Amino acid sequence: MISFPNAKINIGLNITEKRPDNYHNLESFFYPIPIKDILEIVESSNQETRLHLSGISIDGNSEDNLIMKAYRLLAADYSIPAVDIYLEKKIPFGAGLGGGSSDAAFTLKMLNEMFSLQLSTEALENYASKLGADCPFFIQNKPVFATGIGNIFTQIDFSLNQVFMVLVKPDVHISTKEAYSLIKPQKTTIPVCERIKQPMEQWKDTIVNDFEYSVFPQHPSVKAIKDKLYENGAIYASMSGSGSSVYGFFSQPTDLKHLFPSEYVFQGGI
């Protein structure tokens, strides 16, 4: 079985409070985008489950990959045979795009279908929540307003299907600690799920990613990408998640690859 786990972007990301457990509550709008990995799962011929990686190089031991954790999570509760899992990585990691979470969620969905586990959407989301806060988003893979630590979802009827996007991922890694370093949690007066109802031309002044306040001073090259997108006609531009990818929305197809010759660039409709 083959599937194509997709990425997501954050439209607005506000850190609203620090919790007693040292996590942070947030508000954000998650939107799926068509940057996709290629994931194939087949039954193993040698009774050993293995993950085979290609495409963008991924650091670390493959046994620690969220895909393997997803397999082991289901295998602990169900009689699932050994499998070979092939991942061709195309979604940049360390980009705030949720690629690893998407791979894990799609693994759960594929195993459920392949081996007729008959798990409900709710059950799949419960398993996904054990792998990461945003993993459950990719089970239904629809636009949502996210709250809590990014794990409580309210589906929103919202579409960007007439919008063209340019997304740029620089060769910059931003740690979670670094991203939170200058954050001052603050309650929002109007949630982003209401602000996105405004004309997109107003978003520049009303929808913000709080992580930009700590990331941009430490990584001017990331801010420079956002500035270039606006200079070249973006209606709205923002960093996604804690970075380091930056996207811009345009009213028509726009070719900006020449401005970012050494960066990963995606251009297309969403």
Image: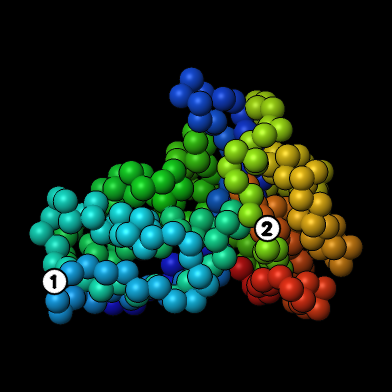
Residue 248 horizontal/vertical position (percent): 74, 61
Of 91 and 200, nearer the camera is 91
Residue 29 horizontal/vertical position (percent): 58, 47
Give the class, few, some or many, for how many residues have Cα within 10 Å of label 1's Cα (few <14, many ≥20): few
Q: Quadrant of residue 151?
A: top left
156 lies above or below 85 = above
The residue wearing badge 2 is 172
Of 101 and 117, nearer the camera is 101
Earlier sequence position, callout 2 versus callout 1: 1
Q: CA distance from mark 2 to mark 1?
A: 39 Å
Task: Check disc 1 and report its element: helix, strand or loop.
Answer: loop
Q: Quadrant of residue 72?
A: bottom left
The residue wearing badge 1 is 47
Amino acid bearing label 1: Gln
Residue furthest toward the right?
231
152 lies above or below 196 = above
Residue occupying the point 18% across, 56% down: 75
